[in-house]
Amino acid sequence: SKFVNDQWMIKNGFLNDAQEHKPWWWNIKVQKLKLSAPLILLPEVSCQKAIEILQEKGYDQAPVVAESGLILGMVTLSNTLSSVQDGNVEFSDPVTKVTYDQFSKVSLEDNLGKLSCLLENDHFAIVVHEQM
């Protein structure tokens, strides 16, 4: 059952501390990383344009965000290239066809311990900044 899984409990906000001997960085806020604003892609961008943008900027992945600000998911260069090569999508298809829509979110106020627990099971997490 999920309630006996510390990683699930932390990921879903039911448990704060999963380790007795936490590393020195465990309670540091994500905000302290001073992350720069990410490169984002709009959902209507074509797979070809997404590949070009990611290669030009030297990124492997980018969030796909609607004009309303809703995060739709994450697109990766390797998945986009392999999907085109395998014939699952065309260069002209929108990037939403290769977007990973299952992802974890952390806020700038969350600590690195929570982020670390998320990354034990997920390939990525999206850091969100809540705006009014």
Image (cartoon, helix red, strand yellow):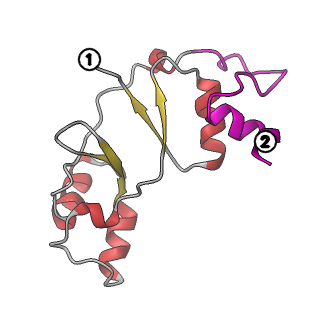
Residue 132's disc number: 1
**Count of labels shown?**
2
Q: Nearer the viewer, residue 130 or 83?
A: 130
Magenta stretch containing residue 13, yes or no?
yes
Question: What amino acid is found at the position of numbered circle 2 in the picture?
Answer: Asn
User: Which residues are the magenta region?
Assistant: 1-28
Relative to residue 117, is residue 107 drawn left or right? left
Image point 24% across, 36% down: which residue? 69
Residue 33's disc number: none
Q: Are marks 1 and 2 in contact (CB under 8 Å)?
A: no
Image point 54% across, 50% down: which residue? 123
Image coords of residue 4 (percent x, y):
82, 40
Question: What amino acid is found at the position of numbered circle 1 in the picture?
Answer: Met
- Vertical placement of 62 versus 79: above or below? above
Q: To which residue does mark 2 refer?
A: 5
Image point 60% across, 42% down: which residue? 119
- Quarter of the view holding residue 126: top left
Q: Circle 2 — which element?
A: loop
